[in-house]
Structure formats: C-alpha cells, structure tokens
Image (tube, helix red, strand yellow):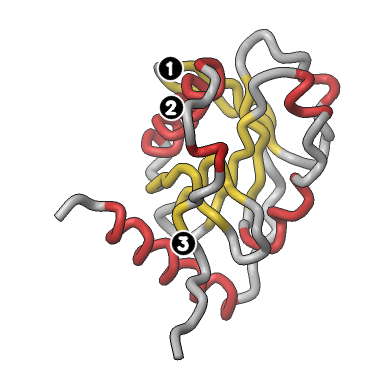
Amino acid sequence: MSATPLLTLSLSPVDGPRPETTRRITRGVARLMVDLGHAPLVEVALPNGRRADVMALGPRGEIVICEVKSSLEDYRGDRKWGDYAPFCDRFYFAVSTGFPHTVLPDEVGLIVADDFGGAILRDSGPQPLAPARRKALTIAFARLAAFRRPF
C-alpha cells in the first residue's frame, strides 16, 4: 500500500504554455523569494487539490505561497485563494506593475514582480501553521525539491 504524497508536481493542463505575463511574474517572485533567503518551488500541487503558483520555504521554516494573477480577469475568475491558508504561514498575490491593486483583499500580502525580481508592497500577516502540519509540509517540500533535480 502506498501513501498519497503531501505535495506533488502539478500535472494539470495549466502546466503547458502559460501566458508571458504569468511567466514573468512567476520568475520575478521566485527571484524575490531567493533574495529574501527563501527556497522557492513553482507549480506545487497541494493536498486539497489546489496548485500553488509559487511555494517557498524560508530560513526559519516558514512557508509562503504566492498566487500569480496576470490580469484583472484572471483574479476575478478565480476565487480559490482562501484554500491556500491551511498550507502556509503567509499568503501573497503576485501581480505586474499595471495591475489595479485596490481590487485585491487587504488581508493578504501583495507582491509586484517582473522578469527581474519583485517587491513586497503589502506584507502578509503571519498565520502560523500547527507544528505537525509544518513538519509534514516541510518534509514533503524537501522531497519534492529533491525529486525535481535532474539525475
């Protein structure tokens, strides 16, 4: 009998070619996470069936999830962001410079990013994970990162 993995590489159709804006924002968010001392992974499937665009593990073990929104229509058509909270300490929307920030909820963080990096415009208030869940997610994150490495 095999156990279901806690985190997996997403194999959904969205893994195909993504719009250029989404790629640029994702790249900038990943670079920002590295600059902050976090180890990022992109396209991480969560146990609840959702897919984190960027998930990062911080130097103190904190888990950050960033949901990339390439346009206002992308944001309005996607209301699943509340489903990420059980799997992270901090949650951010990541958008491009032209995105209308005022439509985003105030209770989550905000990152503006492009190909070259990003900036946190609004920090996400920490909502610490339970220790057992943090341990399970951290181990799953490490295993996923290791299996993504080429052999």
Instruction: Say which label, 1 or 3, has the lower sequence index.
Output: 3
What is the distance, in whole Å, between disc 2 and disc 3 at their CAs? 22 Å
Spot occupied by residue 91 in the image (x, y as percentages of width and height): 66, 46
- Which residue bears the numbered disc 3? 61
**Closer to the camera, 10 or 39?**
10
* Residue at 49% in and 44% down: 43
Element marked by disc 3: loop
| Horizontal side of residue 74 vs 118, given as left or right | right
- Which residue bears the numbered disc 1? 115
- Which residue bears the numbered disc 2? 27
On screen, residue 151 above or below 35: below
What is the distance, in whole Å, between disc 2 and disc 1 at their CAs? 6 Å
On screen, residue 105 above or below 4: above
Spot occupied by residue 4 in the image (x, y as percentages of width and height): 51, 76
Instruction: Say which label, 2 or 3, has the lower sequence index.
Output: 2
* Residue at 78% in and 21% down: 73
* Residue at 83% in and 20% down: 102
| Horizontal side of residue 138 vs 107, given as left or right | left
On screen, residue 57 above or below 66: below
